[in-house]
Image (cartoon, helix red, strand yellow):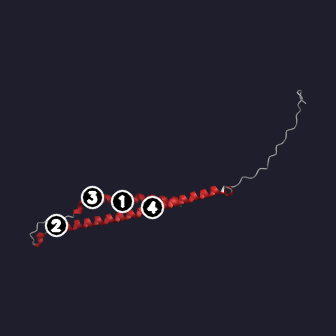
Amino acid sequence: MFRNGFTITPKKQRHTPPKRPLLSKPLLNKQKNPVKQQKEQRNQQGDQAAKQQNIQALVNAHQGLLQQEEDLLVEIGRIKNAQENARRKWHTGPWLQNQPQPYQYQTDAAEANLPLLEGRLQNVRDEKERVRKELERAQRESR
C-alpha cells in the first residue's frame, strides 16, 4: 500500500482473438462486393467492346485507303498511257501518211493533273502506312 492509500492491483489481461492467416488473393476476389464485381465486369466488357470497335474502324479505314490507292493508280496509268500514245503518234507523224495535217503533240487534258494525282497517291500511301501501324498496335493491345 502507498502512503496515499492506493494499492497496486495486477493488470487485467486483455482478451485478444487468435490471429487468422492472411487470405490469398483468389479468396479476396471472391469476397468482394458482388455489385463491385459486376461493375468491374461491365467496365472490362465495355473496354473490350471499345477496342474491337476501334480495330474495326481501323480495318475499314485501311480498306478505304486501299481502294483510293487503287483508283489513283488506275487514273495515273490511264493518263500515262494516253501520254505514251500521243508521243507515239507525234513520232510517227502524219507526214509519213502523206496527210496535210499539221503535226502536233496531242495531249490529254487530264495530263495537267498528273502531278496532283501523284501527290495524292503519296499522301494516301503515307496514311495507309500510319493506319496499318496503328491497327497492328491496337491488335497487340487487345490480346
Residue at which label 2 appears: 90
> Which numbered disc, 3 or 2, marks the residue that appears first in the sequence?
2
Q: Which mark is residue 115?
A: 3
As helix, strand or loop, the secondary structure at mark 4 comes to: helix
Neighbour class for label 3 at 10 Å: few (<14), some, many (≥20)? few
Q: Quadrant of residue 95?
A: bottom left
Q: Nearer the viewer, mark 3 or mark 2?
A: 3
What amino acid type is highlighted by mark number 1?
Val
What whole-number distance in Å separates the C-alpha atoms at marks 3 and 1? 14 Å
For residue 142, above or below residue 85? above
As helix, strand or loop, the secondary structure at mark 1 comes to: helix
> Which numbered disc, 3 or 1, marks the residue that appears first in the sequence?
3
What whole-number distance in Å separates the C-alpha atoms at marks 2 and 4? 49 Å
Q: Would residue 18 appear left or right of 25 to someone viewing this image?
A: right
**Foreground residue, 142 or 30?**
30
What whole-number distance in Å separates the C-alpha atoms at marks 1 and 4? 17 Å
Q: Would residue 32 appear left or right of 49 to someone viewing this image?
A: right
Q: Nearer the viewer, mark 2 or mark 1?
A: 1
Instruction: Determine the residue located farthest toward the front in the rendered image.
Output: 35
What whole-number distance in Å separates the C-alpha atoms at marks 4 and 3? 31 Å
Which residue occupies 44% across, 61% down? 58
> Which numbered disc, 4 or 3, marks the residue that appears first in the sequence?
4
What whole-number distance in Å separates the C-alpha atoms at marks 3 and 2? 23 Å
As helix, strand or loop, the secondary structure at mark 2 comes to: helix
Residue at which label 4 appears: 57
> Which numbered disc, 2 or 1, marks the residue that appears first in the sequence?
2
> Which numbered disc, 1 or 4, marks the residue that appears first in the sequence?
4
x and y percentages locating residue 115 in the rendered image:
27, 58
Which residue occupies 67% across, 58% down? 30
Quadrant in which the N terminus is drawn: top right
Neighbour class for label 2 at 10 Å: few (<14), some, many (≥20)? some
